[in-house]
Amino acid sequence: MSKYKIVIKEDCGFCVKAIKELLDRKSHVQIIDVTDNQSLREAHSLKNNNWPTVPMISHCDEDGNERFIGGYTDLMSELNEKETK
């Protein structure tokens, strides 16, 4: 089962779509909601590549290593590419 970490905000439509897509594909999803300040501080520690928006999506391998994907569009591109292989 694939594992993903997603940094979201409650009012983000693309965040909701990303979570739904991954759950529909039976992936494990760890959600970090940055709507409150404590989670926002945690999200800043996860933020890489100076990604300015949410969602911030990372894929987690079996060893716990994370690979940053990007946002919703980047996630969909990656998932669609995997389907065509």
Image (cartoon, rainbow, N blue to C red):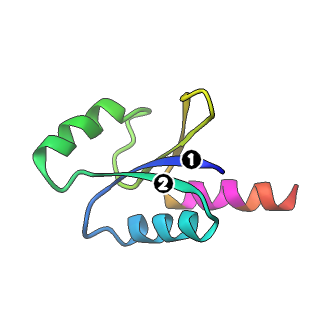
Asked if residue 76 lies in the magenta stretch, the reply is: yes
Please report the bounds of the magenta region as a residue range.
Answer: 73-79
Give the x, y percent position of residue 1. Answer: 66, 51
Q: Position of residue 13 (x, y in %)?
A: 37, 72
Who's the residue at 85% across and 61% down the image? 84
The mark found on residue 83 in the picture is none
* Label 2: element kind: strand
Tell me: 19 left or right of 11.
Answer: right
Position of 23 with respect to 85 (left or right) is left
For the point 64% across and 66% down, which residue is it? 25
Q: Nearer the viewer, residue 65 or 15?
A: 65
Check the picture and name the quadrant holding the C terminus.
Answer: bottom right
- Residue 51, quarter of picture: top left
Choose between 72 and 66: the one closer to the eye: 66
Three-letter amino acid code at the position of disc 2:
Val
Q: Residue at x 62, y 62 (%)?
A: 76
Does label 1 or label 2 sit earlier along the sequence? 1
Q: Which residue is mark 2?
A: 29
State whether residue 42 is above or below residue 55: above
Answer left or right for 84 relative to 80: right
Circle 1: is it few (<14), some (14-19), or many (20+) Cα within 10 Å? Answer: some
Residue 3: assigned label: 1
Q: Residue, x 40% and y 70% (percent of image)?
A: 16
Residue 24 highlighted magenta (yes or no): no
Type of amino acid under label 1 = Lys
